[in-house]
């Protein structure tokens, strides 16, 4: 079974208190989501495989470590975009794929409208990024797509989750590690996480 890691850090808690606040404006919300993206990257990449390389410093030759595998960041549109720059700042060599999904408001089922992924997923470490893990439907469908295209080493990177979404994702994809900064109480009858932070896509892009 993949790991469930809740990333604890005072800076992350501080920024989470800002994005949870309904009075936070769009610009501040977006900045803080991105900054949390950068902060969590340290933890989600902690066990990435490395390989040795010989490097010539200005003084002598020495052995260093570099990443052994390519990293691919795959945001689930739209809200996943909010964390991409923050992660990419820390892993600038990562490729970026996109999966567009929207949740039907009534059924809460995800509908696919866009998929563009790098060609060589087989050997990459793939970070599937979506701030919200609610029913888990969007994450499950996105990871299905990535596996169909050959992806094997997959991590889900979110901000706020809930027991319903974690359970569904772990059942559907037991091989996938899940990283969150908080696991909230539950889903309400409209499929929103409680206490959550509302509709993350709308808050990032100012659409409501
Ligand atoms: C939101 C969020 C996730 C999804 C999570 O997207 O960004 O992708 O809901 O819910 P789930 O776990 O129940 O699938 P939404 O469908 O609202 O689209 P948006 O990002 O374009 O606003
Ligand atoms: N999507 C969101 O943006 N927020 C929720 O609380 C649940 C799904």
Image: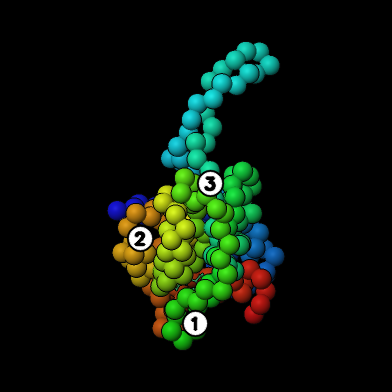
Q: Which mark is residue 19?
A: none
What is the secondary structure assignment of the residue under circle 1?
loop
Question: Is 198 positioned to the left or the right of 88 in the image?
Answer: left
Mark 2 crowdedness (10 Å alpha carbons): few <14, some 14-19, many ≥20: some
> Colour scheme of this structure image?
rainbow
Task: Tell me the residue at 49%/82% (across/down).
Answer: 104
Residue 57 x, y percent position in the rendering: 65, 18
Q: Which residue is mark 2?
A: 173
What crowding class fits label 1: few (fewer than 14 Cα within 10 Å), some (14-19), or many (20 or more)? few
Disc 1 from disc 3: Cα separation: 31 Å
Q: Name the residue: 47% across, 58% down.
A: 149
Front in this rendered view, residue 185 or 187? 187
Query: Real-space Cα distance between discs 1 and 2?
Result: 22 Å
The Cα–Cα distance between marks 2 and 3, rounded to whole angstroms, is 20 Å
**Helix, strand or loop for disc 2:** loop
Q: Which residue is mark 1?
A: 104
The C terminus, quarter of image: bottom right
Please tell me how crowded label 3 is: few (under 14), some (14-19), or many (20+) other residues with Cα within 10 Å.
Answer: many
């Amino acid at each position: 079974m993949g790991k469930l890691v809740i990333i604890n850090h005072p800076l992350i808690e501080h920024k989470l208190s800002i994005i949870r606040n309904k009075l936070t404006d769009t610009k501040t919300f977006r900045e803080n989501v991105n900054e949390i993206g950068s902060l969590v990257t340290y933890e989600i990449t902690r066990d990435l495989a490395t390989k040795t390389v010989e490097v010539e410093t200005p003084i002598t030759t020495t052995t260093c470590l570099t990443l052994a595998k390519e990293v691919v960041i795959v945001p689930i549109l739209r809200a996943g975009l909010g964390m991409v720059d923050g992660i990419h700042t820390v892993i600038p060599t990562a490729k970026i794929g996109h999966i567009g999904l929207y949740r039907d408001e009534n059924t809460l089922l995800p509908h696919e409208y866009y998929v563009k992924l790098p060609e060589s997923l087989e050997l990459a470490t793939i970070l599937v990024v979506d701030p919200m893990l609610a029913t888990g439907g969007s994450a499950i469908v996105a990871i299905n797509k990535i596996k169909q295209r050959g992806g094997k080493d997959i991590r889900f990177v979110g901000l706020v989750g809930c027991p319903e979404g974690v359970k569904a994702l772990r059942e559907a994809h037991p091989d996938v590690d899940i990283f969150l900064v908080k696991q909230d109480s539950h889903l309400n009858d409209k499929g929103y996480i409680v206490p959550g932070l509302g509709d993350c896509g709308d808050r990032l892009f100012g659409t409501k």
